[in-house]
Each structure stands twice: as C-alpha cells, then as structure tokens.
Amino acid sequence: MAGRRGAVLSIESTSVQDYVKAIYAFTEWQDAAVTASRLAARLSVANSSVTGMVAKLVDLGLAEHRKYGPISLTTSGRALALAMVRRHRLIETFLVTELGYGWDEVHDEAEQLEHTVSDAFVARLDAKLGRPPRDPHGDPIPAADGSVAYPPAYRLDGVDDGHAGRLVRVSDEDPGVLRFLDRHGIGLDAHLLVRHGAGSPVELLLGPSAPALPVDAALTRALWIGGSVPHEGCTLRNPL
Amino acid sequence: MAGRRGAVLSIESTSVQDYVKAIYAFTEWQDAAVTASRLAARLSVANSSVTGMVAKLVDLGLAEHRKYGPISLTTSGRALALAMVRRHRLIETFLVTELGYGWDEVHDEAEQLEHTVSDAFVARLDAKLGRPPRDPHGDPIPAADGSVAYPPAYRLDGVDDGHAGRLVRVSDEDPGVLRFLDRHGIGLDAHLLVRHGAGSPVELLLGPSAPALPVDAALTRALWIGGSVPHEGCTLRNPL
DNA sequence: GCGGTTTTTGAGGCACACCTAAAGATAAGG
DNA sequence: CCTTATCTTTAGGTGTGCCTCAAAAACCGC
Ligand SMILES: [Mn+2]
Ligand SMILES: [Mn+2]
Ligand SMILES: [Mn+2]
Ligand SMILES: [Mn+2]
C-alpha cells in the first residue's frame, strides 16, 4: 500500500526526521496517545499539515495510521527516531564537554546538526566521547543498535509531598529553565526533597540548611526526579 | 539598485554560500577570470542557472556583474566567502585531528557541515583546535577577521624540470589523489624534486635513494609545491 | 561584417512544506 | 438516539528555492 501518492520523499528530509522524533517524544517519558493536534501543537504547524505529512511517513513505512486514529511508529520509524535522538544527544554532549557550551546553549545547535552529520561522524563522535550514557540534560543516549536505558523518573508535578530523590533529567527545550537551575546551583544528580506548600507553589529543599526554593508550575513540568529509594537500577528498553 | 527582483533570498542559503565560495576559489591559487560558463562547469549546473543566481548575489550585495562581463565579489561577498572557507577548513581539520578521519574522507562531510554550524561553534572549534594555520590539505585557514596567509606555491604542471621544494598543498576535491599520496607515503611538507622525463609523464623524486615516481596529468594539477629556495616566508593577504 | 561561442532572457518545472476553508468523522451529553 | 462540540481530513492553493531548455542577444577574433 506504499507509494500511493507517487512522489515519496526520503528518510533524509529534515522534516520527516523531525516528525518522527516528535512522535517518539510523546511516548518517551509518558505514554500519551499521539494525535494529529498534539503533534501539530508540538511542531507549530496546522493540523492539516500533520495529516499530510503523516501520510508521507506511512508511505515511507515509518508510521502507522488509521483514519481518525492515533499515530504510531513502525519498527523502522522507531529505528529512525532513535537514530535521530542518538545524534541529537551525542552532539549536545560534544558541545558541552568538548567545546565548552553551557547546557542551555546546545539544544538549538544540535537540532540543526543532527540532520547534517553522517553516520560515520556519529560513530566516531560516540567513540571519542567514550560512549556516554546520557546527554547534558540527563536524557539517555540510545546505543547504535537502538537500545536505551531509561532510569526511573517522575515528573515533579506528579510526585507527592515529601518525595526525595536525585534530579534525573531536565527538559532542554526551555533554556530559561536551565539557567534558573544554574543560578541556584542545581545540576543533574542534585538531591532534592519536594515539599507541597500550604499555598500553591511547590518548594524544593536542597539540603538540611538551605532555604526552600519555590518553583513555578512550568518548572515542575520540566524536572524529573528519581525514586525515593536511595539506589535503583535502570530499566533497559530495546524498543526495536 | 538592490532588490530589483523583489524576493531576495538570504545569505544563509546553502546555494548562495556555495556560489560565493566557488567564485572565490577561482582567484585563490590562480587569477582566472570568473565567467558564467566556468562557474557553471564547477558547480555542475546550466549556464543560465548561473546567470540567474549571480543576479541574486548582486541583489544581495555579494557580487558585481556587468552584463556579459566577468563576475567578481564585493567586499561583503569576499567576507562571506572567507567565512565559508574558514568553516570548511576548520571542520576538515577537526575531523582529521579530533575524530580520526583520513584526509581523503573529510571534504564531503565538511561541504555539508559548513552550512549548518553556527558562528559560535566555529569560534569555539577554532579555539579548541589551537587556531590552526592550515587544513589537512595545506590550505590556509582564514582568521576570523578574514586575513589569510598564503605560502608561495606553484602547481606541479607549471614548474620546470629540476624544481625542488616541499609539498605545500593538495587539492582535496579528488579523494583518489589523496589516497595515491597515502600509498606512496607522501604527505604535506614532503620534499619533492620534479623531473620532466624524456617522454610525457612528470616524475617525482622523493629522496636520494628512492625510485622516481611517475605521476599522471591529473595529479600534476592537484599538487602544489613550494619554491626551490629552502626557506621562504609567507605572503599575508587580507583581501577585505 | 561574419560565424562561432558565450551569455542572457523567457517560460516553465519540480520538490517540499506549509496554509485556509470546508466537509466529514467521532465521541460525549442530554 | 440524536445533537453538538471537537477533532481530523480533504481540497485547493501559496511560496520558496533552485533548476532546466530553447531562443534571442551580445561578444569577439578573423
Ligand atoms: Mn535537545
Ligand atoms: Mn538534551
Ligand atoms: Mn575541502
Ligand atoms: Mn581542505
């Protein structure tokens, strides 16, 4: 049933790569249904653009889609998404560890470069960086074979009062969040205690003597914290 | 007189960048007149494509062109060309020295990446690499301010019998040439003595005891050798 | 001044990705 | 079961960027 529309664009189109990545992102840390409108919102395009583009993904064998149904990736779609995520995160890691970028400065640059570098480049970069397990924001870097180890992590707006754990990941899409954390000396693996104030804002306790730090709602959606148990293993997922 | 055609594309178009680089290349090591047909041949497009694109360069203030006349760069066109050449050569250097690419593998990758990396990336890369003066093929890397130091160099097909000097640069466009040099252990700065055989092919003498190496015509157009005098300075050119 | 070559013009094509507006499907509530 | 709000798809169309071919125009050496 592929090729129904004749002109089928390629797997190398940056748009195709971005759509596939976006679809993958919906199920990476949550398990949200991928609807056309959600995808449209995330990619800042009209709903109808998504319908059209998803049809192309289906033609390319990257996505599955019944009319009016949710969108999902095929095995090769997931493979492409993981390859792109791998590129993105390796590039971000390189920018921070080798070129001295701040963690708030790398996302946009990686967003471009991920479409340009060759497979050979990615392989050599991975080796040069010592096969890092995660990027500067705590996101796991898929291995070349597509396997990924996700640490247990809970979004801050979903944990109970009194939850304690280490900062596992920070969404890297809003540089402002990253700079906020910088200002307060909070980095990856920082130990945090979550306190629901009597009023609305969530507070973070950084240590026994530090003052409580109120964080706004946007921030609670950008931070992911480990479990209360001191040490836990990782869940190895190989989605391929 | 700019903007005559209305829709003027930007300085960030990869095509614009490639055209400007190509124009610059004609006068980098020779002083060839840049005609539309030569540019078309180099870029593998039709003559009329060049006419159209050059008109856009003129609109952008990057090129000067009288109808039926030769094409040249304006000051800002030259600045853009030098910025692109700088990017290209820094990236090639990075690929070889940091990622372990062979010098025959870097050109195509750099050709893509040069359009994608940011100015910040280039600045940081230059610092990381220790501000290298030349790329893996001997081509000088323009400084951030656009100044370039060109060593004296003569193309092999233009030197007399008995000319001796060091290998100053190798054109990086044909990986086969680079691999040929690898096979014979010839690298940048190798000392060469040029011998015009009685027959047609030029021969290279690599050392007192080494056998003469015959080189074909294509190769004589890809190699550039220093002067016969043992040690010479560099010509500093700041074309801006 | 002629003839061959080069350049420009004109008209058009194509790939890719996006949009608006209208029509169609879905699902939740009455 | 039907209504209605919401989501999704279709249809038709825009815009950018770059390219082509064919024909007309200019150029240049003789
Ligand atoms: Mn990122
Ligand atoms: Mn990241
Ligand atoms: Mn090169
Ligand atoms: Mn080079």
Image (cartoon, coloured by chain):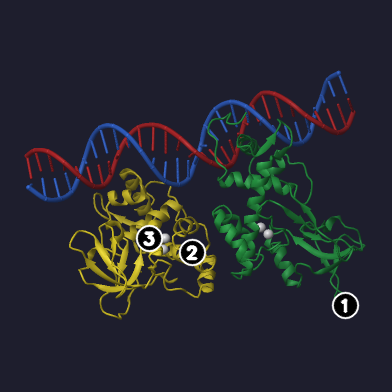
Chain colours: A green, B yellow, C red, D blue
Q: Position of residue C14 (x, y in %)?
A: 46, 35
CA separation in Å, label 2 and label 1: 48 Å
Q: Is residue A69 in view?
A: yes
Q: Nearer the viewer, residue A15 or A239?
A: A239
Relative vertical location of residue A170 with respect to residue B153 in this rendering, above or below: above
Position in image of residue B70 (x %, y %): 26, 55
Image-quadrant location for residue A225: bottom right
Pinpoint the chain carrying mark 1: A
Question: Disc 3 or disc 2, which is closer to the eye?
Answer: 3
**Disc number for residue B180:** 3
The kind of residue tagged 1 is Ser
Relative to the observer, which residue lies in front, A2 or B23?
Answer: A2
Query: Residue flagged by tag 3: what amino acid is it?
Result: Phe
Regarding mark 3 in the picture, which secondary structure is present there? helix
Q: Are marks 3 and 2 in contact (CB under 8 Å)?
A: no
Instruction: Indicate whether C15 appears above or below A159.
Output: above
Look at discs 3 and 1 and give the one toward the viewer.
3
Quick one: quadrant of the N terminus of chain A? top right
Q: Secondary structure at mark 1?
A: loop
Residue B194 drawn at (x, y percent)? 25, 69
Q: Which residue is mark 2?
A: B91
Label 3 and label 2 in one chain:
yes
**Circle 1 sits on which residue?**
A209
Find the distance from the CA under tag 3 to the CA under tag 1: 68 Å
Residue B90: x, y in percent? 47, 66
Mark 1 crowd level (few <14, some 14–19, many ≥20, 10 Å Cα) = few
| Residue type indicated by callout 2 | Ile
Q: Which chain letter matches label 3?
A: B
Which residue is pictured at 38% across the width and 70% down the height? B188
**A59 sits to left or right of A187:** left
Residue at point 47%, 67% (across, down) = B93
